Image (cartoon, rainbow, N blue to C red):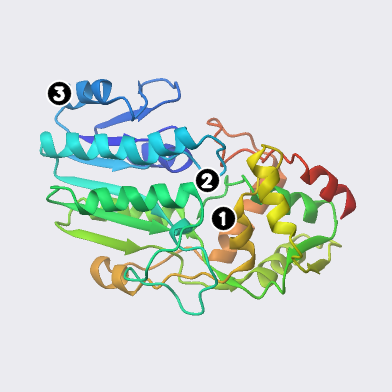
Amino acid sequence: MILIVGSCGFLGSSLVTYFKNRKILKVDKKFFKNQYNIDVADLEKLENIFKKNKIKFVVNVAAEPASSNSKKKIWNTNVIGNKNLIYLSEKYKIQKYIFISTSALFVKDYKKSVTEKTRPSPVELYGFSKLKAEQDIINSDLKNYAIFRCPMIVAKNRLGVLSFLFDLIKSSKNVPILGSGKNLFQFIGVKDLINVIHKSFFKIEKEIYNVASSEKISLISLINKLIKLIHSKSKIINVPDFGFSFILNFFNKINLSPFNIYHLKMLRYSFTMNINKIKKNYKFVSEEKTSKLIEDSFIYYLSKKPDKIKTEITSPIKLGVLKILYKLC
């Protein structure tokens, strides 16, 4: 039996589809058919599931997102909920605990790709909460676990903050970027990540892994690819920061902008992940390139196909004060 925690989310719903022919239990604080409607911070309700079912694998993909303005929700889901799942996994002797972590642990300009041994540098609560969750797993008595650190997870229906960029290019508006745009980054395709999660069921280990596409691309190159893809008349405008990111982060704190400090630094800083460890231990071969992932997402967005399950990640962002910037572009 596989327990998928966060089953209504972007990754969770994809896992549910992938394992549809297996015996699975679905847990999410959002109500949806054929699943347990439980907040992971509620230990008593969670334990009832473990008591009544023979769970072998726990896949914890539940997370209050970085864009959330509720510090309490972020901590309760990402830390308290994870502690509850660790405790129950130990008590009921599950075979494998799998936790999805984040590149938000590393928020500064990295000249070299980070390894699993690179010292984390989170800058906001989401990153700190994920780091604390990792530490709780490492310091636990779990006999078998894997922590997968991921950059942005992308599938064709991924929108969220990407919708702002897509709208600008679709409308042939100028695309402002902070700095030169030469900063490098990677994404990870949801299919690649799910394959890794599945492989993890068959390994006995206590490990942390970076999981990302093998393709590293600059922000300016990626945007140019999207512009050429639909023959848009958009032009890239390089904008010096001059406190602009600080202002947007302030607006985020008062719920007027979707971009927090993590998003803004991601747009300015180079960050790539060394994936040699997972290549070696899992024979991992990335099938989805960073640029192709975003191109597919852009094409899907232009088709305006509705998703059956709406999440914060699969829905367009609420622009807030960015409406002013959008009109000026």
What SS does tag 2 mark? loop
In this rendering, the answer to whether 286 lies above or below 131 is below
Which amino acid type is marked by label 3? Lys
Residue 66 - label: 2
Circle 3 or circle 1, nearest the eye: 1
The residue shown at (10%, 39%) is 93
Q: Locate residue 220: give its quadrant.
A: bottom right
Residue 325 location, x and y as percent? 83, 50
Name which of mark 2 and mark 3 comes first in the sequence: 3
Residue assigned mark 3: 51
Name which of mark 2 and mark 1 comes first in the sequence: 2
What SS does tag 1 mark? helix
The residue shown at (85%, 56%) is 173
How far apart are the alpha carbons under marks 2 and 1?
8 Å
Residue assigned mark 1: 262
Name which of mark 3 and mark 1 comes first in the sequence: 3
Question: Is residue 17 shown to the viewer in this render?
Answer: no
Residue 57 location, x and y as percent? 21, 41
Residue 236 location, x and y as percent? 80, 67
How far apart are the alpha carbons under marks 2 and 3?
32 Å
Is 126 situated left or right of 282 in this image? Answer: right
What SS does tag 3 mark? helix
Q: What is the crowding at mark 1: few (fewer than 14 residues within 10 Å), some, or many (at least 20)?
A: many
The residue shown at (48%, 47%) is 125
